[in-house]
Image: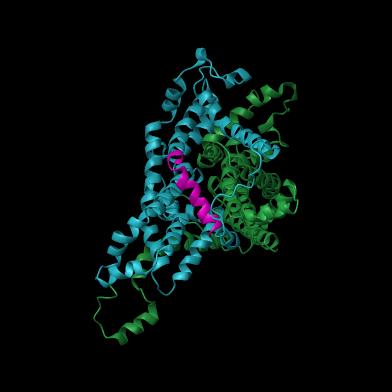
Chain colours: A green, B cyan
Amino acid sequence: MTIAATGRPSGHRDRMRSLFGRDPIGYAFIAPYVLFLGGLFAYPLLVALYISFFDYFFAAPGAQVDRPFVGLSNYTAVLSDSVFQRSMLNVAEFIVINVPLTVLLSLVLAAALNAKLPFRAFFRVAYYIPYVTASVAVIGVWLWLFSRDGLINGVLGPLAPSPSWLVSDVLAMPIIALVVTWKQLGFYVILYLAALQNIPRELYEAAEVDGAGVVRKFMSITIPGVSSVTTLVVILATIVGANLFTEPYLLTGGGGPNGASMSPVLLMYQQGIEQGHAGYAAAIGVVLAIIVMTISAINRFVLEKD
Amino acid sequence: MTTSAAIGRASPQVAPSQHDDRFSLQRVVGVAALVAGAVLFLFPFYYMIVGSLQRAPDTGISGAFPNPGNLTLANFTDINAQVDLVRTLMNSGIFTGGVLLATFFIGLLAGYALAQLEFRGRSVVFNAMMLILVLPFQLFMIPLYVLIVRSYGLADSYLGMILPFAVNATAVFIFRQFFLQLPRDLFDSARIDGASELLVLRRIAIPLARPAIVTAMIVTFIGPWNEFLWPFLITKQHDLQPLAVALANYISTVAARATNPFGSILAGAVVLVIPAVIVFVIFQREFIESNLGSAVKG
């Protein structure tokens, strides 16, 4: 299939070229990836939509079961389910705590890291380590720190909350939001650091000549200079919030107490896989994906307007 | 995200915003914030190691410091009795290794084709890839479970674990971005000599792409090594579970009955964390720069 070595008349080659492009060998190179995309993304996407319109449940292998078309009834059931509503409110609470904190802390740390200082590489690594370690492993240590007789309550002494952190329906979700903020922050620090390094130094020098102080420079140069990264951070943090599973499953023992830290993905797991109502769970997935993509689009529009 | 990249060309190097007095207030505050941040980030890991070595759990303030009289490796043997560490680490390794292999072969071919070869439909594939980067995984959880476990009977198999992660989209993106920078002439001379496209890829493109390959492989490594939800869904057999899944099952079911539950949980956590941290510390430059490149210049 080499292009140069083909001795065919050029008319034939021109026709092939206009039909397939200059390098038809590209089809062979891309084929395995296209197969992967089709088989593990496009087709499952259609299956998800299909299942969500049927009373689709799991039966014993080989058993013949009737899975009737039920129209939108999975969707109406999901939207009117109080557990689902609670899980969406929990995600909203998560986002309200996590997103502003993430943007603020990662921008401040990145700005501090952007100055010439000793041990910069050490700090970069320190911030990044939670991001590259498994959630399951760090949840082990946070479980211990926040347990009733744990170090945090030990330090607080009489100020320790009762009921304790992870079994309090007021505190469970904020703790999850804080732990996830801690886990992901390093990634966002690095994103901001890259954006900061792209802001021309002359802008700061010109502002200093005009007598701008530290705060003024930060507000007028730094924040606008990193706005595209802020959009990305807000979108990524929202997706992380919507995908929450491991933390409510392990840290608060399955979305407890009493569903106070239930997440939509945990509900999908319980309904779809533990109880076998795949149609219902697929509908949760579709609703959630639509909401996440809408929020991402709005964020993009609002934050990148100027 | 193109604006910042365009500005970047004016001053690509580190531009420290402070260049005044070495001991200015601003600098002191900055360093203090960084040190406080680093303590907050690293303390849980330090405490994980200390806790994994305690004979009797000490949750008091004194427990934050290693006490020579209370040190033991018994927690590691305890967790190993409940969760076969060698076996589960091997499962994590096979799962991760399978994803790395598939990403290397399929992803490299795809990245090269998307950057250097012109064929009809190329932009469709590229847009599909970009869409996957933003579609949330929850959308795929149920249908993938239905297909892989129910239709294809791949529950409790390495193939079932690997398939949904097989080709890391970020890695394909990194490959494509790298090959885009290479001029086509570079390859054309070899093509004129009659070399096949596969030979061009092997002899010219891959040797040049070594840094991009290292970066892509590290980014890919972190995903399956730390992944919990998917392997948790499809492995019920203990001898096929990756360590993250086995440890999570231990936390949620067995730990309550152990004599020093946190000690053994933390011992398992240390074993799970160490390989990822070693890989990260060795390759941290490539790892961090990849995120710089893919996010800002994308």
Relative to A114, is B71 above or below?
above
Relative to A28, is B158 above or below?
above
Q: Position of residue A297 (x, y in %)?
A: 65, 62
Q: Position of residue A241 (x, y in %)?
A: 63, 48
Residue B287 colored in magenta in the image: yes
The residue lying at 47 percent from left, 35 percent from top is B273
Q: Is residue B140 visible?
A: no
Name the quarter where the C terminus of chain A is drawn.
bottom right
Name the quarter where the N terminus of chain A is drawn.
bottom left
The residue lying at 27 percent from left, 63 percent from top is B199
Span shown in magenta: B280-298
Number of dots carrying numbers: 0
Q: Position of residue B108 (x, y in %)?
A: 38, 58
Say left or right for A188 vs B113.
right
Depth check: give the residue in front, A154 or A18: A18
- Majority secondary structure of magenta residues: helix
Relative to A84, is A16 above or below?
below
The residue lying at 27 percent from left, 72 percent from top is B192
Depth check: give the residue in front, B148 or A39: A39
* Occupied quadrant, residue A115: top right
Say left or right for B156 vs A271.
left
* Occupied quadrant, residue B95: top left
